[in-house]
Amino acid sequence: MDIKLTKELIHKLPKTDLHVHLDGSVRIETILELAKEENISLPTYDAKELTNLIVCGDHTESLDDYLRGFDIVNLVLQSKNSLRRAAYELAEDAAKENIRYMEVRYSPILHTQKGLKLTEISQAVIDGLKDAERAFNIKTGVIICGIRNMDPMTSLKLAELAIAFKNKGVIGFDLAGGEYDHPAKDHKEAFDLALRNNLNITIHAGEAYGPESIHQALHYCGTHRIGHGTRLVEDGDLLNYVNDHRIPLEICITSNHHTKSVPDLSNHPIDFYISYGLRVTINTDNRTISNTTLTDEYMLAIELFDLDYPVVKNLVLNGFKSAFIPYKQRARLINETLKEFDLIEEEELKTKIKIKENL
């Protein structure tokens, strides 16, 4: 069906965000308010200056450069109240653009500076998301992240935490952080434990390092999805393996540009991945750090690569198909989404008929 892909239409579509970081998506005004409430020292209390320090742009040189803003944000995410509020507001912002299912990832170890226990941190984030689920039309899950550049024993401890909260809000385990020179296989023990306990796995791979990083995520750590995977295009055999096994890619276009995992936006491999048939999903990564929304990410892909409505519809459905939720819940979400698409298509058809009649 030939439907014009406007920003208004993309905003209206039911969507998923499977790759979004809690600490990369805190509102600037919330950071300032939390700092004042909890007497936390920030580099500046001017909203514009703080935005310039945290939000990335074309000037960002690498993944490590991109990650610097998180240090500022995490200064205010050290209490149960702040974590609960940040989680709630992230879900609220997502629901406003019709994201119906979102998986929020973060590493609890980064929120222990003031003595909070890992269990307290985990419960605060889950509580914030559950509050939002009651208030808005959105379903959520939590992915706990190990950190590549930390001791692998920390990842093991975080995997144990994720297992303890499985079926209580946590739906997966991840490995994030600086990718170069911090191989995923060093954290294999954590992933072995997660897999033995039937926990869903996603791993940041192929963002700041090549296909070997993706290979390790798949064959050493047993990942079920790939976070980013922009470098997968460099290894055709591995790419075919990912395609044949329907392993979803969590693509975050703006973030990939900021981290320089792609030289420029026009060279992003998402166009090739889509045309080749890979299971591509579109996500935000960090709403605040990259100053983006999911609607913006879809529009960027549409404008850069001239995507049409059937392709966009398939990308949306890929998100629901790739969700880390039980099959029956996933099937129900997909069927509800298809019904919404049918209604939207009927509306678009009626509008076209009216326009023709008035000519």
Image (tube, rainbow, N blue to C red):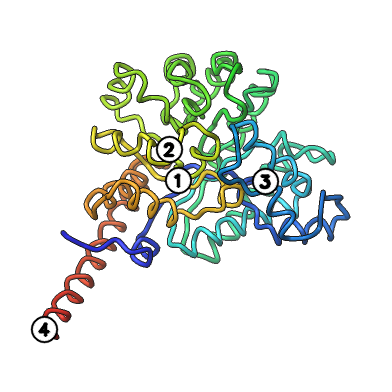
Q: Is residue 84 left or right of residue 298?
A: right
* Mark 2 or mark 3, earlier in chain: 3
Whether label 4 touches label 1, CB < 8 Å: no
Question: In terms of image quadrants, where is residue 39?
Answer: bottom right
Q: Residue at x 43, y 15 (%)?
A: 219
Whether label 1 touches label 2, CB < 8 Å: yes
Q: Tell which tag, 4 or 3, sits nearer the viewer.
A: 4
**Viewport quadrant of the C terminus:** bottom left
Element type at mark 3: helix
Q: In the image, which disc is placed on residue 357?
A: 4
* Mark 4 or mark 1, earlier in chain: 1
Whether label 2 touches label 3, CB < 8 Å: no
Q: Residues within 10 Å of mark 2 (few under 14, many from 20)?
A: many
Location of mark 2 (residue): 250
Q: Amino acid at mark 4?
A: Glu
Question: In terms of image quadrants, where is residue 346?
Answer: bottom left
- Provide residue 144's location: percent of width, then percent of height: 59, 35
- Provide residue 255's location: percent of width, then percent of height: 52, 41
**Viewport quadrant of the N terminus:** bottom left
Nearest to the observer: residue 106 or residue 49: 49
Q: Amino acid at mark 1?
A: Asn
Location of mark 3 (residue): 123
- Provide residue 188's location: percent of width, then percent of height: 55, 15
Distance in Å between CA atoms under marks 4 and 1: 39 Å
Location of mark 1 (residue): 283
Q: Amino acid at mark 2?
A: Glu
Distance in Å between CA atoms under marks 1 and 3: 25 Å
